[in-house]
Image: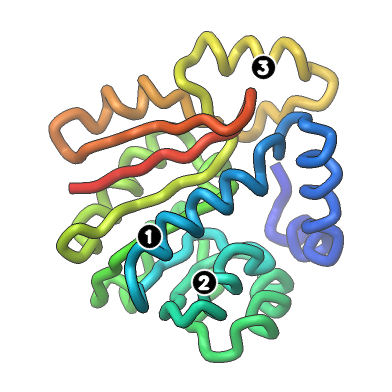
Amino acid sequence: MLSKQGFDLWANEYDHSVQVSEESDSYPFAGYKEILNAIYNEVMSTEKANILDIGFGTGVLASRLYEAGHDINGIDFSNEMIRIAQLKMPYAQLIEWDLTHGLPEHFKKKQYDVIISTYALHHISDREKVAFIKELLPQLSENGKILIGDVAFENRRKLEACRSENLHHWDDDEFYFAFDELKAELEGSCKLEFHDFSHCGGVIQISN
């Protein structure tokens, strides 16, 4: 797993790295554009949404939503990625923050129509994901939703199959979603749906 400094150094090449993986339909970013477009289209069903973006990176998705008139708040732990994203979204409220510390107190005072996270939550453990999602649920406005686009699989068997096919560059320091396990952990707390867009990527939709 890259450190904060590693992401700062990678920031200027990040979008190109994603593009190479996405265009070759290879792990980890196969289906990347479709995943972002699916989240974009879902958000656009709400007019002038108040959005919280968890791990917005260089602002690829958030800037499109910003340009469409939505209110963007966001956290990311890379100062350099924040700098790049802020240039695209000068009036967005973007904060440098470590996901493992939960939400910043400032953002806990707000409610959000949509909380989005793309290719960020795999940097925290499965247990931390469950706790973090539970922390996010009270921040949703009425009919609000959480949309997570990431390296994700319907179940552990499919995750392990992908790992076997990509052993030469699989990142064992990252924790990818096995949807059935996440659903079992959150049973009774919320409603969950999973939509896969490639052999290694999908969108998880969560609502109260």
Q: Quadrant of the N terminus?
A: top right
**In the drawing, does residue 171 fall left or right of residue 193?**
right
* Precedes in sequence: disc 1 or disc 3: 1
Looking at this rendering, what residue extends furthest in the bottom direction? 91
Seen in the picture, residue 197 relative to 104 is either above or below; the reply is above
Q: CA distance from mark 2 to mark 3?
A: 32 Å
**Tag 1: residue type?**
Ile
Residue 45: x and y, percent?
36, 62
**In the drawing, does residue 34 fall left or right of residue 8?**
left
Residue 42: x and y, percent?
41, 55
Within-10-Å neighbours for mark 1: few <14, some 14–19, many 20+: many
Identify the element where label 2 is drawn.
helix
- Residue under numbered circle 2: 65
- Residue under numbered circle 3: 162
Say which residue appears at 46% left-offset and 16% top-offset.
Answer: 155
**Tag 2: residue type?**
Leu
Residue 161 visible to an observer of this rendering: yes
Say which residue appears at 77% left-offset and 31% top-offset.
Answer: 25
Q: CA distance from mark 1 to mark 2?
A: 12 Å
Say which residue appears at 60% left-offset and 12% top-offset.
Answer: 160
Is residue 14 or residue 197 the one in the foreground? Answer: 197
**Tag 3: residue type?**
Cys
- Residue under numbered circle 1: 115
Mark whose residue sits in front, 1 or 2: 2
**In the drawing, does residue 125 fall left or right of residue 190?**
right
